[in-house]
Image: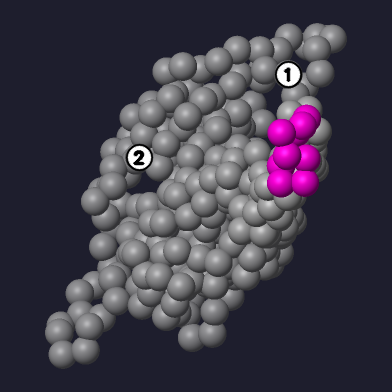
Amino acid sequence: MASTFSLILVVVTVLTGIIWTLDKLVWSKQRAAKVAAARVNAGAAVDEKTLAKVAQTPVWIEQTGGVFPVIALVLILRSFIYEPFQIPSGSMMPTLLVGDFILVEKFAYGLRDPVTNTKFLETGEPERGDVVVFKYPLDPRVDYIKRVVGLPGDRVIYRNKELLIRPRCVEGQECGGFKKLDVTFEQRGEFSQMGIPLDRYTEQLGEVKHETLRNPLMPDLVDRYYRQSGTYQDEWVVPEGHYFVMGDNRDNSTDSRFWGFVPEQNLVGKAVAIWISFEFEREEGSVLPGWIPTGVRFNRIGAIK
């Protein structure tokens, strides 16, 4: 399902493109023919001001012709190359903070029709550890951002705040067991949730080393987990063509543990960089509206791990 903005952008690009093309191929030649006829009819007494009026491009065509290349460029950039997104929640802390503005690489997982989101060219697939933007499976109008934990065929367990993965078994090869991720405790208290200091860890997920947060006082909400037939309540087998994703802020993220898997066709792209980061914290009683930034976090600008 295309976003309303994408649909409007495509429609405006097509309409302005048609007008621009008609002017280049038809209407401009008609104006030139009128000028030539006026010169012949007037002879030596030709009035240059009159000819200028005859040759003048109508304002609405001139404005459309000027807008079309810009809109077409925006459509190409946004649909097939990079699209900007804003981080609205803390589910990916500490990797991404509220106020971060990120760039999403649209061609990372295939080129897609901006209206139907149908893939027409293969360019790659998500890898374990990628931070991805996708259409929320329960409401495709909403964009979500999480980290890929499980690939198609993987078995994933999240138990006692520990993540265990058994990669898919390839037929004819011996299947290994579950492997606990390499995790290192870093510090406590840099971030908090409802006044509770959070523990920050470094986690090795595939080829990616990144940071996660845990709330040491919050139990795993196993009774709310998405239930999959034939597995334990805190275990999932990733279906073909789907991905298991989680937020880095493990106890403050609504992710695959609670609603299931991300279909491949819901993928939007790979989050690759923070291009600007605004601070919105302010003193209690401030008269400034909450949407006005109070500062810029220049130290956060750069690639996303």
Task: Count the marks.
Answer: 2
> In terms of depth relative to the viewer, which is nearer, 55 or 79?
55
The picture places residue 145, in percent across and down from the top left corner, at 54, 50
Q: Residue at x 48, y 40 (%)?
A: 103
**Mark 1–mark 2 distance (CA, rounded to whole Å):** 28 Å
Q: Residues within 10 Å of mark 1 (few under 14, many from 20)?
A: few
Q: Is residue 44 magenta?
A: yes
The picture places residue 98, in percent across and down from the top left corner, at 60, 31
Disc 2 residue type? Lys
Mark 1 = which residue?
Answer: 292
> In terms of depth relative to the viewer, which is nearer, 198 or 50?
50
Disc 1 residue type? Ile
The picture places residue 5, in percent across and down from the top left corner, at 71, 51
> In terms of depth relative to the viewer, which is nearer, 1 or 235?
1
> In terms of depth relative to the viewer, which is nearer, 102 or 233?
102
The picture places residue 34, in percent across and down from the top left corner, at 74, 49
Chain part drawn in magenta: 39-47
Residue 177 appears left or right of 139: left
Q: Give residue 305's mark.
A: 2
Q: Residue at x 48, y 55 (%)?
A: 80
- Residue occupying the far bottom of the picture: 172
The first of marks 1 and 2 along the sequence is 1
Q: Secondary structure at mark 2?
A: loop
